[in-house]
Image (tube, rainbow, N blue to C red):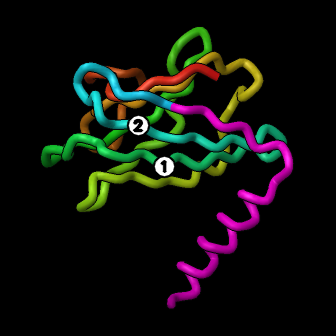
Amino acid sequence: MSKKALTREDEMASFLSMPNIQVVSLTGSDEAKSAGALLLLDPSSKKAFLYAFNMPPLPPGKTYQLWAILDRPVSAATFGTDSGNKGRIMIRRIRDMSQIKKFAVSMEPEGGQLQPTGQIYLSGAL
């Protein structure tokens, strides 16, 4: 096992042991009825971990983008999926966490966008 992988596992274990973790459930839209995700948030560190499952396969040149919805959508992260159509990403900092009303995931061009331009595949309220 590489040092990088061990560090990622250590970071995840440390994150999951935080006492004030909030869990947000994201459900699939009409475009992805069987998809879903869990977003684990730690308000004190402003870190989050997203685990998405049953996501539709990404076409070449596309990525999924997580949006924090305040008065307008703000990009939180981009992520791909593995061969099992699962996506996992540790988000090091979510801005304005206390003002977020909900989260959504859209499919966007690789590299992400400043605002959502693609279909919404997942959404969930805080």
Which residues make up the magenta segment?
1-25
Q: Residue 51 carries which label?
A: 1
Q: Which residue is drawn at 41% across and 21% down?
A: 115
Q: Position of residue 24 (x, y in %)?
A: 60, 32
Looking at the image, is mark 2 or mark 1 earlier in the sequence? 2
Q: Is mark 2 on a helix, strand or loop?
A: strand
Q: Position of residue 33 (x, y in %)?
A: 28, 28
Q: Does the magenta stretch include residue 27?
A: no
Vertically, is 125 above or below 6? Answer: above
Kindly give the residue lying farthest to the bottom in the view shown: 1
Q: What residue type is labelled 2?
A: Gly
Left or right: where does residue 89 sit relative to residue 36?
right
Query: Which quadrant: the C terminus?
Result: top right
The residue lying at 32 percent from left, 22 percent from top is 29
Residue pointed to by mark 2:
36
- Identify whether 5 is placed above or below 59: below
Tag in front: 2 or 1:
2
